Amino acid sequence: MIVNQDRLTDNNKKSMSSYLAPSVRDIQPSGIRKFFDLVSGNKDIITLGVGEPDFVTPWHVREACVYSLERGFTGYTSNAGMPELREEISRYLSSSFQVSYDPKDEILVTVGGSEAIDLALRALIQPGDEILVPEPCYISYSPITSITGGVPVGIETTAEHHFKLTAEALEAKITPKSKILILCYPSNPTGATMTYEDWLPIAEVVERHDLIVISDEIYAELTYDGKHVSFPYMPGMKDRTILVSGFSKAFAMTGWRMGYACAHPDLISAMLKIHQYTVMCAPAMGQVAALEALKNGLGEKDRMVDSYNQRRRLIVQGLCDIGLECHEPQGAFYAFPSIKSTGLTSDEFAQRLLTEAKVAAVPGSAFGQGGEGFIRCSYATSIAQLDEALDRMGKFVEKLTS
Amino acid sequence: MEELSEFKLKVLDLLKEDARRTPALLSTLLGVGEEDVKEAITQLEKDHVIVKYATVVNWGKVEEEKVYAQIEVQITPERGRGFEGIAERIYLFPQVKSVYLMSGAYDLLVEVEGRSLREVANFVSEKLSPIESVLSTKTNFILKKYKQDGIIFEERQEDNRLLISP
């Protein structure tokens, strides 16, 4: 485990913060960041706080990258990404999720899904636009929205509805300024997924209010019971959706920073303008690795998904045995149990769990509205570690409630 | 040979990773009843699909001196029995750890364990070579084991992820 050391320690420097753009200065550091600092000093902890696979990138992918380096494949690629990679992404999306995108002008290879989200928001937002975000959700949508002058509007989802977005909840937050809906299913942190039937009424509202959708489907492959339904697959939704995905989660490639966006050519060409002036192109080595992952890595991916599924059953069962109510997450690799029965806030619970039981989990409050009262437990860790973590949590909860 | 069900294959995969996993744990991991798991394991044991629950030991970590050799053996097959009889005569020696019938330049690959080079050499010259149908042997001593049965022996830093990430 690495301890992050990138914080400034020199207190003698004069403050420069008055020079900062208020839009950036006023952004609150994420709750995850705060918790990270707490965890870093602790020893012998088991962490359920990690938002990435516990697998190392499969060897054939790493080897393909090493080989390309040996051959000297170290230059820029075309701005949108290597044509072979875009073609392979197109084939993959079509065969796996039945959505078709033209590799020529509808696919853009980015530095992780994160860049794709940034590009999409920057390409679309005018100051004052309202951006609808179902919460609890991944932590970056709101801050990036704010930086670009948009106004994030949270839509609370609840355990009662398995943290699914409902048309009523969406409709209730729509105003004349509403422009974009950001979707992230399967969901980080709740593990919620949306079926075709779940999507239908959402698509209807999107159509009626003429919204643009950014659908972050980075966890698409990690869908356990049933099949992932890509939002652009819904009738009438493809043109108004920017599909964002990447290689991090399904192919265990977080550090490579390889993602992509797919959308209507008008939207992709706008995003490409920003992309070419800011990063030129995604890293060439990463693109070679991503290409290898798609060409020869689907079997390995299936094995990893199978393994997450086994551990998902283990943690859900374990949490319920402990007495922490937990809806069954259908996707991603997070369980999101309620800790309300303990009477603690999620911040207090997570802090005490860390210091008293040596288990790290992320307080749900870090993920926005509706997250309070829950903690996020990543099960992307070994079965032995999960067993031990559940054991420690059990004793901790027993002590709290006795 | 019967084709195993996907369920039994998964049970085997999980037990191959760690033979000490209990039926209760396997039942949770696979989302099936504990009785079904027990029944499957019993059946697999009965059918000799699961042969034994062994421990993989990295003998390189302990003082005890052990020497391993792979011996390439060329033999004349016996009329009517092919390689079976001679393979059996070889694998019944306790110092023989595994025997494979090979395609290619030789017939049997015999893995032998001994306490010293001399002991292995004696085994080859006194037990293996004199067997009538053995035409030739070529002994290769193993210097170091890096990986065995899918398990890497070298200890590595297993998890270098950030403790908390979004």
Image: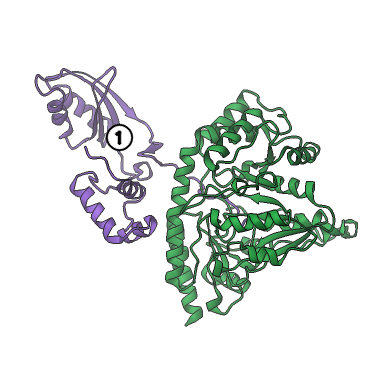
Residue ID at (68%, 55%): A206
Badge 1: few (under 14), some or many (20 or more) residues near its Cα, within 10 Å?
some
**Viewer-proximal residue among A237 and B133:** A237
Say which quarter of the image contains residue A10.
Answer: bottom right
Establish if A131 lies above or below A123.
Answer: below
Identity of the amino acid at label 1?
Val
Note whether B108 is above or below A39 in the view shown: above
Chain shaded green: A
A7 left or right of B109? right
Which residue has dot 1 on it?
B67
Asked if one can make out residue A118 in the rendered structure from this viewpoint, the answer is: yes
- On what subunit does the disc labeled 1 rest? B
Q: Nearer the viewer, residue A40 or A399?
A: A399
- Judging depth in this view, the residue of A53 and A202 nearest the camera is A202
- Residue A33: name its quadrant: bottom right
From this view, report whether residue B42 is shown above or below residue A73. Answer: below
Q: Quadrant of residue B151?
A: top left
Can residue B155 be seen? no
Relative horizontal placement of residue A285, taking residue B152 as reference (left or right): right
What shade has chain B been given? purple
Number of marks in the image? Answer: 1
Indicate left or right for B75 with A170 as reference: left
> Residue A400 in the image: x percent, y percent?
51, 79
Q: Secondary structure at mark 1?
A: strand
Task: Please name the residue shown 57% across and 34% down the image.
Answer: A91
Left or right? Give the position of B121 relative to A90: left
Q: Is residue A384 above or below residue A353?
A: above
Residue for point 24% across, 47% down: B52
As drawn, the residue found furthest toward the left would be: B80
Outermost residue toward the bottom in this view: A402
Task: Give coordinates of residue B45: x percent, y percent.
Answer: 21, 49
Give coordinates of residue B5: x percent, y percent.
29, 45
